[in-house]
Each structure stands twice: as C-alpha cells, then as structure tokens.
Amino acid sequence: MATVRAIIETLLFVSEVPLSLSKIKELLAMYTHGEITAALEDLRKEYSGDSHGCAVVEVAQGYQLRTKPEYAGWVRKLNKITPTRLSRAALETLAIIAYKQPILRSEVEAIRGVDVGGVLHLLLEKKLIKIMGRKNVPGRPFLYGTTQKFLEVFSLQDLSSLPSLKELEGFAKGPVEAEGAEAGEAKGERAEEGAV
Amino acid sequence: MTTAGEEYQVRLEIFEGPMDLLLHLIRKNKVDVYDIPIALIMDQYLQYLDVMRGLNIDVAAEFLEMAATLAYIKSRMLVPGGGSEEEDEEEDPRLELVRPLVEYARLKEAAFVLAGRPQLNRDVYARNIPPEEVWGLERGEEIAEVDLFQLIAALQGVLKRAEPGGFMEVNADVIRVKDRITKIVEILNTVSSITFNELFPEGAGKGELIVTFLAILELVKLRMVRAFQHQASGIIRLYLAVGADALIQGEV
C-alpha cells in the first residue's frame, strides 16, 4: 500500500499534465484498481492537511499536484510574475462558448450583442478555445469549443462540473459589476499579453 | 480628438454592449425583468446614448439597433391587443427582449462563477517544465528523424530569431567548420543530447550561425550525429549516433 502511494506521488510530482486514472493504471499494471484508487484517495487526504502547500486535485479528467490557492503569493514572490487576467469581455465570451459549444461566432455575438472577433482571437491564442469544425450552412462558418487547457486553467474536472445554466439565476443575485476595476484589469491584461 | 477616442474606450469598458447596458438599467431601477416598464427603460437608455453623443463618442450601431427594438416594443405595447379574441393568444411583445436578456444575465453570472474558480497560474500552480527539458528518446512514438529540409527550416527559425538586432560582421577570427564539428562532438560527449537551438547562441554572428549549421549537416551526413524532432513541440534534438542507436533499439 505504502509503495503504491509513493509511486503515484512520484508520478504526480513529475508530470506536467494531469494524469488520468487510466494512465496511472497502465503504468502500475501490477496493482489492482482498488489498490490504486485507495492510494490516490489516501494521498489526496494526506495532502489536504494544513502541513502541505500542495494538494492532489482532480482536474481535466486526471490528477495533478497543485499548489494551494492560499500560497499563491509565495509562488509569485519566487517567480516574480504577474498573473494573467482575462478581461470581462473575454470571460463572458469564454463562458458562452463553454456552455453553448459547438457554437458559431455569430451566435456568440447574438448573445453578447457585440462583435467578438478580437476576443475570439485572443482566446484561440491562449488555447482556451479551439475550432471544432465547420457548420454545414452557406459560408461554412467555424464552430468553436473549449479545450483541455480550458479545464486545466479553470480547475474543472470536465464540462459537467460547471454549474448548469438553470441554476444560475442571472437576476436573483447581485450584479456582476462588482468585479472591481474593469478598465484597469483589461489594460493590465493587454500589457501582459506582450510579456507572455 | 484623442480625448474622445479615450472616452470611447472607457465607455466600452463599462458597458460591453447594448445588452449589458439594458441589464444595468433593469438592475438599477430594480424592476422585474419579466415585467419591464419599457417606456422608463427606453427613456434612460436613450439618455445614455445622448450622454455618449455629448462626449463626442461614436455610438456603435448595436446600441442604435437596440434603441430601435425598444421603440418597436413600446409601440406594440400601446396598440391594444388587436382583436379581443386574439388578446389571450398574443405574446407579450416584451418577450422577444426578455428571453435573450435572461439568457445573457445567466451567462454573465456563469462568467462570474468562472472568474471565481481557482485559476492555474493565478491562484494555483502546477509543475511547469519547459518542453525542451522534458522529453528524451523515451517517447519513441512521438519523435521522428529529421531530414535536410527540416534542418533548413530550423535554420531559418534561428536566422529569424537573430535578425531583429541586425548582424554585426566582425571578421576578427574565422571559425572553421572542422573546428565546429569537433566542438559539437565534444559537447555531445558530455551532455548526450542537445537541442538544435541551443547550438545557436543568441547574439552570434551570421557567419558563426552558418558555420555551425554546416557542421551539423556534415555530422549528420557522416552519420556521426542523428537528429530527431519531437512531433508535438517541433524541437529538434541532436544525439551522437552511437548513443542514439542504443537508445532506439532499447526503447522502440
């Protein structure tokens, strides 16, 4: 038991992408499914303790060792990087694509009421969305969808871990405007674009 | 004129579009979205457009389109429901506005929820190893031996990278291909493998880059060095032929 756990911990430490359960099982073929899942759960529990700065998280249909949010400041101190922020326009467009994919640019624009060409380009560049194909209508326009990286960036196990649209009572809750200095945020993002 | 341009930017930042503005007005007036007082909202909407014009801002076409929609709905509200029989069946004209508005509000909320999630490289961090250091010959299926054309393409990349600063030709010492070959073999004897780009240090003169490239070509031709390209990242890595043989036979 202890060995399986140590092996999995090693793999999670070294891997730069989330490791799927099937990949772990493939690598540890000599252990049973039960042993592996028990070891994973054991690791997850152990790392969730206060004495650890990292946690075993389930993300993008896999497992990954990630730092805990409360220690983000220390990582930034070490790496001296300013985190990239998405503008409100980018986030809204991304949310629409995440929920409505595969979706046409014109459909996104119909929902937002504004042109989204520039934002789509940015999201494609950041590899948060991808072109999934073309719709069989005149002009054969592109269909957009979210990527694996989108799940990784937003700590999502899969698309179903997003709250359903029905659950989101757009009008019951407070306004989204409470997000803070939007203009500053968007400007900061543009500056960071060059740095990335 | 420049100030007007800046104002336009600022305004757009505040309201992403007509839907956003409408949503704001509905919330500000605390009215029921399913029972929007069209006259009131339309009034404020137009006032807002006036403010924009007053600031010499180009009012985007989308904003005007929405103003037209509001006016149309308002006019239909004024017309008593056609015939008395149809009255029950006729849809509230505001519905064509309410449906997309509710949808937009929900998706905006979704964006808000998304923004609040722990975000990679903002709130949480994972190991981040540059791809050049990660892969070796172990992932046999993902690499392929490169040919002359791929090497030339890689050289073009190197030259492009070197270009911005411009080349400064200093003819002090001439580097010979023969010497460079010895140097590369020496490097490979100590580190076992090196990426193509690493052999071309930044700031090197054009002459040096070309000599290095010729040396690589010669080594590949003599089968002393084998070059492999990682398919996913496009990175080319060079190995001494002896070592590469052993690795390939052992792994693939």
Image (cartoon, coloured by chain):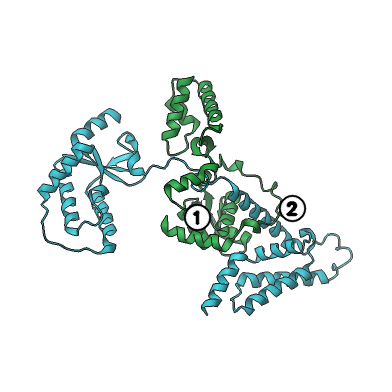
B38 left or right of B239 in image: right
Seen at 65% across and 63% down, the residue is B20
The picture places residue A102, in percent across and down from the top left corner, at 56, 50
B45 left or right of A34 in image: right
Q: Colour of chain A?
A: green
Identify which residue, B68 or B107, lies in the foreground.
B107
Identify which residue, B167 or A67, lies in the foreground.
A67
Identify which residue, A21 or B72, lies in the foreground.
A21
Q: Amino acid at mark 2?
A: Ala
- One can see residue A31 in this view: no
Could you tell me which secondary element the residue under label 1 belongs to?
Answer: helix
Q: Is residue A39 above or below residue B101?
A: above
Dot placed on the residue nearer the N-terminal end, 2 or 1:
1
Q: Amino acid at mark 1?
A: Leu
The residue to which callout 1 is attached is A123
Q: Is residue B198 above or below residue B62?
A: above
- Between the C-alphas of marks 2 and 1, the distance is 29 Å
The picture places residue A43, in percent across and down from the top left corner, at 52, 28
The residue to which callout 2 is attached is A172
Numbered label attached to residue B248: none
Q: Colour of chain B?
A: cyan
Label 1: few (<14), some or many (≥20) within 10 Å?
some
The picture places residue B234, in percent across and down from the top left corner, at 33, 47
A67 left or right of B56 in image: left
